[in-house]
Amino acid sequence: MGVQFSQFFPPRPTFTLADVPSQQGKIIIVTGGSSGIGLELVSMLYSKGATVYIAGRSESQAQAAIDHIQATATTKTKGQLHYLPLHLEDLTTIKSAVETFAARETRLDLLINNAGVSQPPLGSVSAQGIELQLATNCLGPFLFTQLLLPYLKAAAAAADSDPNFPSKPSAPRVVWTSSQVAELSAPPEGIVLSELQHPPRDAVRNYVTSKLGNWFLSVEFARRYGSSSTGRLVSVAQNPGAANTDLLRNARWMKLLSWPLLHKPALAATTVLYAALAEELDRPENNGAYVIPWGRIHPGVAPGLARHLAAEEEGGSGRAKEFWEWCEERTRDYL
């Protein structure tokens, strides 16, 4: 339980904004970047000169975030901030979000799948009738990432061919947001596939499924695109840490109970910053890594969970692959 305890009470971060080189020229998307951890992260990236797209449902909230970041910026180096309309809970809208992005950019250097929902009212479903947490936290980001794949690959090709390509890390990266509950509360089967179509009347269990799903998708993305002949892509999952954000707005009792463990969003953002920009995650052996607060590679996943993360040819159960294929099937009509 040592590694679990250290995620509740992490050591001081060793990778901070001061360790990040200039990001001028980098094109970045942060979903859910108008509040909480996402807002802190966008502010950090902006201060390093990146062009950042805040992807989310509310243009007014995104514009308020942009105004706040620009008004409070203290560094001479400043990037660019744009709003990108994105409704993760409705698969029919995601392609148009990518088309909006593609009208302005030819490549994508970093995608941070930060947005999510936790414990909505029981029975909440997406526009396609899928349990809302599974749809918003997994299916939406999966489809968004798949549609952005050509732009990530374009960035990989540019990084390989241009010696003056913007700063390290050079390999395009996708960051997926998981949670410590994926380790603490997942059932022995990992993800129970029958529950994806027929979820239990248990909002917490469904949230756990979605957060383990994010981890599964990250590992599978690394497995499929980590050694691509058209350019290597890096995939990282992370538990940002317990932070005082709006994520638990639908579970106020849980927020009250966990209050002593909640940290400032800016501290949790250092976890995501590490997952997004730490050079050591560019190493092939770290592709598919899981990052824990406040910016450390997980030292050792429990054997049962590690088995579900591994492919069958690696001696695993192949459950992560099965979940990826389920997501493919559910999103195929919206590509």
Image (cartoon, rainbow, N blue to C red):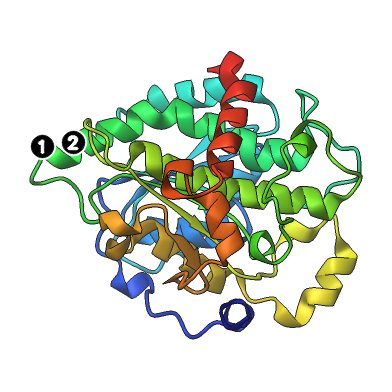
Q: Secondary structure at mark 1?
A: helix
Q: Residue at x 26, y 58 (%)?
A: 283
Badge 1 local density, few (<14 within 10 Å), some, or many (20+)? few
| CB under 8 Å between discs 2 and 1 | yes
Relative to 326, residue 169 above or below: below
Where in the figure is residue 317, as x and y percent of width and height? 56, 46
Q: Amino acid at mark 2?
A: Ala
| Residue 161: assigned label | 1
318 or 287: nearer the eye? Answer: 318
Against 84, residue 72 (above or below) is: below
Within 10 angstroms of label 2, few (less than 14), some, or many (20 or more) residues? many
Observer-nearest of 36 and 159: 159
Q: Residue 104, located in which quarter of the rendered image?
A: top left
- Tag 2, which secondary structure? helix
The residue singled out by tag 2 in the image is 158
Report which quarter residue 28 is drawn in: top left
Q: On the picture, is 90 further left or further right than 110?
A: right
Which residue is located at x 82 percent, y 55 percent? 204
Q: Amino acid at mark 1?
A: Ser
Quarter of the figure that contains the N terminus: bottom right
Residue 82 seen in render:
yes
Residue found farthest to the left: 163
